[in-house]
Image: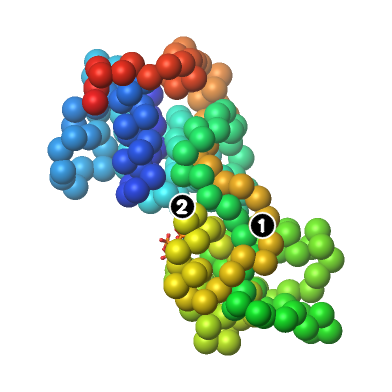
Amino acid sequence: MLSIALPKGRLGDKVYKLFADHGYPCAAMEQDDRRLVLRDEASGVQYLLVKPSDVAIYVEHGAADVGVVGKDVLLEGGNDVYELLDLGFGACNMCVAARVGFRENFSAPLRVATKYPNIAKQYYANNSREIEIIKLNGSIELAPILGLSDVIVDIVETGATLKQNHLEVTHTILPISARLIANKASMRFQAAAIQPLLTALTTQPMEGKNS
Ligand code: PRP
């Protein structure tokens, strides 16, 4: 069976719909239960429901053959996998944001709060700017409000979280979207299963069949 790691949650729901619309349905996915491995014998696929930030780890180690992951997670993890396809959804931007009207003090290291220390370090290294990273795991927008950091490096989708916390984007680092990734060995040994999936995902959806 081809093992596909899907991110649980918002992104995962969209990904599953995409797969179903392109000929890879899974009846078990429609049931609201706590199973983490869901099989579809007809298509020869099993879905592994994993935390979004863990998808690339499962794929890199071969626990899953392919997976769907945000470009943000992929860049941050630096995982040794093949990136096969930009799925085009989950679109947002990786940005630097600060309090509205913030003035940067260039004579001191910039204090950067983020869930993405590697992306932030790379960005500021490219700009020859000395920084201090404050690694957080969520609610990043709180950091500049409380004076814990000068700026944040985070994803911005609608911009609502920034706006409601009186922050604004000062720089856009790069656009982000969902990517289909594959384990390097699986690309050789499971090519007969991965190639049809790739073809299906890059052709028109099978409208009405699974929706
Ligand atoms: C993400 C991100 C921002 C927010 C951006 O947080 O870290 O906080 O979404 O979305 P917006 O521009 O549409 O407001 P997430 O919801 O993943 O929660 P977190 O704060 O726990 O990371």
Residue 62 in view in this figure: no
Q: Position of residue 82 (x, y in %)?
A: 59, 32
Looking at the picture, which amino acid does disc 2 mark?
Answer: Ser
**Mark 2–mark 1 distance (CA, rounded to whole Å):** 22 Å
Depth check: 143 or 170 in front?
170
Mark 2 or mark 1, which is nearer to you? 1
| Residue drawn at (50%, 33%) of the image | 87
Residue 14 lies left or right of residue 53; in this view the side is left
Looking at the picture, which amino acid does disc 1 mark?
Answer: Thr
For residue 42, which numbered disc appears in the image? none
| Residue drawn at (24%, 22%) of the image | 210
**Quarter of the rendering containing residue 102:** bottom right
Q: State which quarter of the image contains the N terminus.
A: top left
Q: Position of residue 44 (x, y in %)?
A: 31, 18
Q: Do the residues under discs 2 and 1 have CB atoms within 8 angstroms? A: no
| Residue drawn at (60%, 56%) of the image | 94
Is the residue indicated by label 2 positioned so its CB lies within 8 Å of ligand 1? no
SS at mark 2 in the image: helix
Ligand 1 image position (quadrant): bottom left
Which residue is the site of mark 2?
53
For residue 172, which numbered disc appears in the image? 1
Q: Position of residue 204 (x, y in %)?
A: 43, 17
Mark toward the start of the polypeptide (2 vs 1): 2
Chosen colour scheme = rainbow
User: From the viewer's perspective, is residue 124 above or below residue 207?
Assistant: below
Q: State which quarter of the image contains the C terminus.
A: top left
SS at mark 1 in the image: strand
Residue 106 in view in this figure: yes
Depth check: 50 or 98 in front?
98
Q: Position of residue 176 (x, y in %)?
A: 57, 46
